[in-house]
Structures are given as C-alpha cells and as structure tokens.
Amino acid sequence: MENLKFTIEDREIAELLGRQNFSTKESAVFELIKNSYDAGSETCNIYIDDHYIKIIDAGKGMNHEDFKTNWMHVGKSNKGYKDEINNRIFTGSKGVGRFALARLGNQVKVLSKKNTENAIIWKTDWITSGFEETNVDFDQGTYIEILDLRDKWRSKDINELIEFLNRAYKSKEMEVFVHFKDNEPHSIQSKFQNLKIGVNYV
C-alpha cells in the first residue's frame, strides 16, 4: 500500500488554525503572551499602534533548528509539560498557538535569538514563508511584528484587551505591559489572586 500525507496550502492553514481557531483578537494576543511565558521570559511587552502590533520578550528564543523542525511543523510542540529550569507549567496551545499571528495580521516578522547563537528572522504573508540568519540588537529573546492588521485598535479596544488579560492572565512570574501609541503603558494585574479551593469567585 502506498503511504500518503495530507497537503494543505499555507493560507488555508492560517485561515483554519488562526482566524477561526482564535475567535477574538484578545484571545489571539493572550495566546502569544503564553508563548512568551513558556519561553521563560520575565517580561512581555505588547506595542499596539494603527499599523502594527509588536510583542517582545526576553525568553530563551529560537535557533535555526527550532524554526525548521518545530515552528514550521504544524501540530508539533517540543514543550512537554513543565520547564524544569524556570519551574513553569507550560500553557500554550500544542503546536497551533503560533497561528494566533494569522488572526491578528496578514504579514508577520519574527526575530528570535538563543543565547550565544545566531539570530533568525522568519517572515510570512501566509502564502509564502521563509527564514534566514540575521543580526539583532538583543542578546536573547523573541521580537514579533505583525503588519496589515485585520482589526482596528482604538482606545476602547485596548481597554477591552486589558480587561480580558486582567481576567485571563494569572501569573506573577512574568510581567506583562500593554503600550498603545504614545500613552503610558498598562501593567496587567490579575483580578484573581490568592484563589482558594471551594470558593465561588463568579
């Protein structure tokens, strides 16, 4: 019997796993925050303007092999269950969280660097994708830039995002900041702290 593998176009993957899997723009941003958390970063900065979204962390970053064998392998995750170094339980969606990028914009650029290794830049318009080595001005971490945004972001939308993240994000191990245009950054502060078993918090 001849073995067969499914083939699917990049744009269709982006549509199915990004734009439809993440129903709101807030949930897509939250998924990318989870990736920063899983990378062991102590901070995650989200910059939103009329024409771009940038997400910057200082996590462990990715190298050439990570991009080739994990990032570009749909449905595959190399995370396991727990990061023993940082003592964090992994939170990201297994192998599809990166498609939150497709929910937010039609063009994406990801720069990532592991400590002491060469930095990598990955670009896509969800039709073609490619990556190569590059130079960056940071020692370790990941910089994501999303362009040709699918949604308009106004002050009202930023307030809704902050409210969503205040409810959804509960960790004190990584600080999250939301920057909107030239306004002062908003620090995400969990509404649910010191939770106790058996207490109804609705």
Image (cartoon, rainbow, N blue to C red):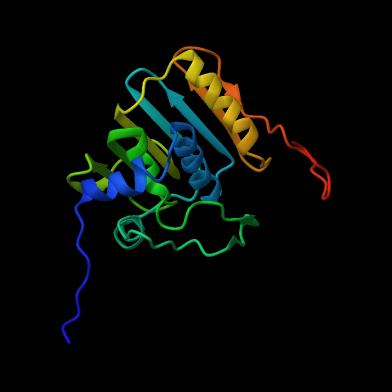
Q: Is residue 160 above or below residue 55?
A: above
Which residue is more in the foreground, 116 or 36? 36
Q: Image check: 11 left or right of 89?
A: left
Q: Is 66 left or right of 56, judged from the image as shown?
A: left
Q: Which part of the image, by quadrant, shows the C terminus?
A: top right
Q: Quadrant of residue 64?
A: bottom left
| Relative image position of residue 62 (x, y in whole percent) | 39, 52
* Residue 107, x across and y down, in percent: 26, 35
> Is residue 103 depicted above or below 177 in this figure?
below
Which residue is located at x 57 percent, y 55 percent?
90
Give me the residue at 44% from left, 15% from top.
154
148 lies left or right of 96: left
Above or below: residue 158 compared with residue 93: above
- Asked whether 119 or 161 is in front, the reply is 161
Residue 74, position as x, y percentages in the image: 33, 58
Q: Which corner quadrant holds the N terminus?
A: bottom left
Question: Which residue lies at the image location 64% right of the left edge and 34% below the top edge?
Answer: 167
The residue nearer to you, when weighing 136 against 146, is: 146
Query: Total label count?
Result: 0
Is residue 65 shown left or right of residue 200? left
Q: Is residue 131 visible?
A: no
- In this rendered view, identify the residue nearer to me: 101 or 4: 4
What residue lies at 17% left-to-right and 46% top-to-bottom? 128
Please indicate, yes or no, whether residue 25 appears anywhere in the rendered image.
yes
Q: Quadrant of residue 4?
A: bottom left
Instruction: Please tell me whether residue 161 is drawn above or below residue 175 in the rendered image.
Output: above
